[in-house]
Structure formats: structure tokens, C-alpha cells
Image: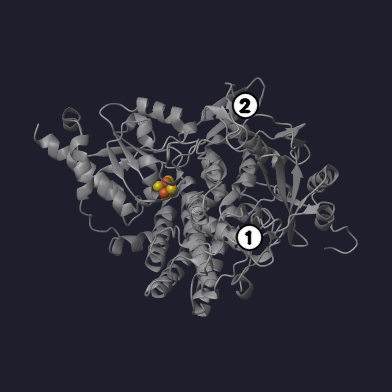
Amino acid sequence: MKQGTPSTLTDIAAAGRRAEHHAPFIRAAVPTDSWNLAVEHLAEGRLTLLDLWGEAGAVHIALLDEEAGEAAVASLECPDGRYPSVGRRHPPAIRLERAAADLFGLVPQDTPDPRAWLDHGQWGFVHPLGTRMPAAASPYHFLPAEGGSLHQIAVGPVHAGIIEPGHFRFTASGETIVRLEERLGYTHKGIEGLMAGAGIDRAAGLAGRTSGDSTVAYAFAFARAAEAALGIAVPPRAAWLRALMAELERLANHLGDIGAVCNDAAFPLMLAHCGVLRERVLRASDAAFGHRLMRDRIVPGGTAADLAEDGAAAIRALLANIRARFPALVRLYDNTASLQDRTVGTGRLSTALARQYGAGGYVGRASGRRFDARRAFACPPYDELAFDVPVLAEGDVNARVWIRIREVEQSLSLIEQILRGLPAGPVRADVTASDGPREGAATREGVATREGMAIVEGFRGDVLVWLRIAATGLVERCRLRDPSWFQWPLLEAAIEGNIVADFPLCNKSFNCSYSGCDL
Amino acid sequence: MRRLLFKSLIHSPLTEPRPPASSLAVGELVHALDGAARRRLGRSLAIRAVDAGSCNGCELEMNALGNAFYDLERFGIRFVASPRHADVLLVTGPMSRNMREAVRRTYDATPDPKWVVALGDCARDGGCFAGSYAVMDGVSAVLPVDLHIPGCPPPPVEILKGLLALLEGVNSKAATP
Ligand code: SF4
């Protein structure tokens, strides 16, 4: 905590009733005035919103004190299903509140946006995770943008390329975009509903299928949340292997993205070369872990299997290959005027907005927000590895490309360090005995629910998983929060004043996940 | 840039040998393809990808088909931007209810003859999402599926095998009207 200023998070939590077992952060059920105080802190930028989610009769907010490097969860019981809206004072919460309203029927009072979000009126009932009731058809109203020369362009949910479905409503004045409104929710699969009552292993598999390109990050975050809840220590070798997978995933995605952004700026040569490098990462991952995307390889307790015998050699060969080829591509990017002409100054996101929304990953770091969960909540082996967190202030497409380029370089170094320092030993701790109370878990009348939370740096930014495990050992409630929740609204802001033709380029430079927030 | 371009001219290509068509996929094809439609298809296949609620893993591998290793287009197979140009709808995901309408409309916009390929485990029967209030447990709940390519996600080579099987099935039948 900073000296002289009140320790906001501690204060808020202290005013409430602490959850008996919530690790490694504090969770407290707070009274309404503390809730409102937290909202005030969010609105004034002293705290950052990490997540907002619901369950029957309660709503939770995860809060981050960036300077202190602390996180906590504040919960508000709302037996009547109403709570004071966070979004009213702090817009980043609005979509989260709309989602919680759809799933649980929780009503944010005085919300500026009461429209449905995930619920498109197709499920046959409302509030699938709360008290189900028959659905009443209601049309979806897009936000108005009015003026003599304005016209609307509606795109999606099925797009022209091989991408996820979503609807974009552009209002343009000639070629210039005046307003973009996104409508998502098309890939809503009800993952949180499926997790309720599932065993840990099944839930881990579902978590790994939240967003295909971040399957490692999600499995990693879920495993850490489960281990925190159950009080399980992961063997050192497993911790290092997880970081190895996480960096390989970051590498593959960044390489793919760099190529794809350039392709959308009408420069396919970069896509061709970056596509080859990405494929090489996937093949090395396959050789090392038996799956190109490394799906289901991170499990609660450790990893599903050890590094394959020739895995380290395959990864070393990969590093050598990328090191030999990548610098020429970076020079090509840097020296091609026609490419720079498209990326420099395009889709600018201000530092103020990036901070307000707590934007993670390259979106935040290209706009001056330094947060990286590998630093802020370092788990082994990141606390022993040397790496930089590149930050730029320009906030344009070019800056987001450069952050990716720098992160590719950092990941190459990290992977090398991991291979060098990889400790020997087992790769999985026993989690089967997880149906009894753990040491340190307070029991009340012999019943212990255990809660855990984890924040892991995916390639796109920080992935948060919050988990409550019932005394039976089954998952009672699991919340998965993708970094895109806070990046999608920023895309709407960044695109304003750009031309329609630059939308694909801006969109790709954000590369937000649909499935990750549709859940 | 010139140096890079020049290098790609003198280096041996990365493209790999054509994989054999999957016999399993061929088997599924035999009863799936309608004789009259087969005759009308030349030696090319235009695919429209439709994400019906996938986790995006299947799309990643579909995209990988375009890289220099697989170079999908050498088989006469290409992804097109509009269903109106498509012979095949390649549908992924457990068929979310929120996508039902859009998928149906995409199918209706695709001219006959057309085929539907369900890509990935969850497109078959919902996979691990089966039973959710929000999904319809597979693509066949909304569209007639002609071929299924399993995997989570199927690696590019498996997608390629499935597509080749589709193509070969189409042409061998077309040769014997
Ligand atoms: S089959 Fe697997 S990879 Fe494909 S969409 Fe379903 S969960 Fe994702």
C-alpha cells in the first residue's frame, strides 16, 4: 500500500465478513456502503475492475490495486436479486452486469444499459442459471446515432473470413466511422452452467475449451484456482513445464497475429512467412506435448504428461529457426512504407481509456498500461526468470504490432531459460484426495467449501478464474473471465474516426476473443 | 523485401506431399453423396466456413490449412467469402442456439448442390458442451450433415484428408454417371 493513502482494498474487505477459505486472495461479503465505496474507487481510478459475476442471490466484484499489486473479491448479498449498479459509475462493468442479469436475473439498479447481452431470446427461457422463467420475445435495440448524412452498415454474425461470429453495427458518415456497436453472445455455450456440479477434471476440460487460442492459459488458470482452493502444491517440474507451454502458446499466437495484421494491411508476404513460423511452433508443441495447441496438457495438480523425450530438442530447433528468420521479418515490417502507412496512427486507443478499462495484454501495453500477470502475480518459475514487459504509449495498430514483436523476443528468451533450468522430478501431485477438507480450510459443521482464484497471463492478457468447490469435491460455481471483456469495448472507442476499410486491420490488431466472453 | 522474395524463389518449397484420403471419411461419404449432384461438380471445391459456437480451436486449424506447409489451394480447394459461392459448408461448434438462425440462413443462401461437413468433436454431437441449455448438441440438429471430421481440433492434415475424401468421392462418382 502507498503511504498516506488509505489501503483501499484492505479497508473494503475489513468492513465485510471474510470467506472462510478463499485463496490466495481475500474475499469478503461486504455491506452495501462498502460496495458503493468500492464502486467509487473504481470510478475514480484508484482500483481496477478485474471482473464482475453473479450467482443466485449474490454478486461479486474482483478488484485490483495496481500500485500495491493486490487483488481481492468483494461480494454483495442480494437476496431480492437487486444490487447497486457498478456500471452506472464505472462503464467497464456494464457488459459484465448485462451478462450476469441474463444468466441469473440479477438486476443492477440504475444501470445505464438494461439490454440483454448473452440472451438472444433463443434458449426458450430466461435466467438459465437462476430461477428459470418463460422467455418473452423482445427486439434488440442498437444505440442510436442520428444525423443527416449518416448511414448504417450491418456486418455479421457470419463474417467473410474464417473467424468467430459476432455482429458489428457501423454508423458512418461517408467512409468515416462515427459509431461502432458490437453485439456478441452468438457462441454462448453455457460453459459456466455446465461447470456447476461437474467434477474437477471435467471442469478443467471445459475451461480449456473456453477460447481455443488460449487453451493453455485457461487450463493453467483453472488448475491454479483449483490448487489454491484445495491447498495443493504443484511439483516444481510441472510448474516449469506449464510456463513452457504458456510461452509456446504466446509465441504461436503472436506470430500468427503479426502476419494476420499485416495481411489485413494488404501485405500478404508477412502472413506467408509468419504463418510458417507459427506452424513450426505448433509442430514443436506437438512433438513436445503431443497436441498442437497443447489442449488438456495442463491439469489440476500439474501436467497430464511429461515433456516428450525429444521434445526439448524439437523446441531448441524451433528457437534456432525463429531466431534465424524473425529479425528479417521485423526489418521488413519496419522498412515497408506502404505497411507503416496503414498501421501508424490507425485505431488509436488512449492511455486513459486503457487504464480505465484495465486493458490487458498488447492492447493495454501498447497504450501505456504496464500490467502483466506474470509480474504482478508471479508464480514459479516466472519469479526466477528474467524478462521485460514491453510498453509503448502510441496506442495505434503499429504499437500493438510492436508489442507483439517484442513479446515474441521475450518469449524466445523465456523458453530458452525454461529449457535450461527445467528441474527434474514428478509432474503431477495427487488431487484425488480432494474430497476432504484441506489443511488450513476452516470447517463449519464438518462442511467445507473451498474457493480459489487465479490470474494468469494469456497471450491476449490476463485470464481470471474464480472457483468454488463444494465439500463433495464437485465444482459449485466457476467463473472464467477473458481479457476480451475489457478490450472489446475499447475497440469500439479506438475505431471512431477511422475509415470503414481500416476496421479489419484495427480489429485484427485487437484480436479479441468471441468464444472467451460469450462462454 | 527483395531479398526475402528472392530467397523464396530459390529455396525448396515447404509444401508437403499430399496425404492419403482417410478411408473412414470415404466410407462415410459413400452414402452421403447424392449422384445427381456429384456430376455437376468440377475438380474444385469452394468452402464456406461457419462457426456455430466453436471455441475457435477448429478455426485455428482451418486457417493453418492456408499456410505454406499445407497450401490448401493446390488441391483446388479454397475458402470463399460468401455462401453464395460455396459448394461446402464447413461447420464447427456444438451448434449454439444463438447461431441457429444465422446458420440456417447461410445454408439457405448456399446454392444446390451443397454439402455440409461438421468439423470437430463438438460439431458431431455437442462434444463436451452437450446437454447445455445453450446448444443443440451438434450441427445435424439444424443442417443435414454429409461428413464428419473428428478431432478437438482436428489437425490440418486430418481436415485435408476429410476434404480430399469429399473431393475424390465427388469425382469418382461423377466419372460413372
Ligand atoms: S471440437 Fe474442440 S477445438 Fe473444435 S470447436 Fe469444439 S471444443 Fe473447440
Q: Earlier in the sequence, mark 2 or mark 1?
A: 2
Nearer to us in this view, A32 or B92:
A32
Label 2 or label 1, whichever lies nearer to me, is: 1
Most extreme residue toward the front is A445
Give how far apart the Cα atoms at labels 2 and 1 are. 41 Å
The local secondary structure at tag 1 comes to helix
For the question of whether residue A456 can be seen, the reply is: yes
**Which amino acid does the dot numbered 2 rest on?**
Phe
Instruction: State the image coordinates of residue A212 (x, y, percent, origin top left).
Output: 47, 51
**Which amino acid does the dot numbered 1 rest on?**
Ala
Instruction: State the image coordinates of residue A181 (x, y, percent, origin top left).
Output: 61, 33
Nearer to us in this view, A53 or A294:
A53
Vertical relation: A228 (above or below) A109: below
Judged left or right of residue A199, residue B43 is left
Q: Are marks 2 and 1 on the same chain?
A: yes
Instruction: State the image coordinates of residue A274 (x, y, percent, origin top left).
Output: 43, 58
**Chain under numbered label 1:** A
The local secondary structure at tag 2 comes to loop
Dot label at residue A169: none
For mark 1, what is the residue?
Answer: A229
Quadrant position of residue A278: bottom left
Looking at the picture, the colour scheme in use is one colour
Most extreme residue toward the right is A4
For the question of whether residue A390 can be seen, the reply is: no
Instruction: State the image coordinates of residue A238 (x, y, percent, origin top left).
Output: 51, 71
For mark 2, what is the residue?
Answer: A142
Judged left or right of residue A344, residue A320 is left
Judged left or right of residue A511, residue B37 is left
Q: Would you call the spot at circle 1 few (<14 residues within 10 Å), some (14-19), or many (20 or more)?
A: many
Quadrant position of residue B69: bottom left
Q: Which residue shows up at 43% across the image and 53% down it?
A: A271
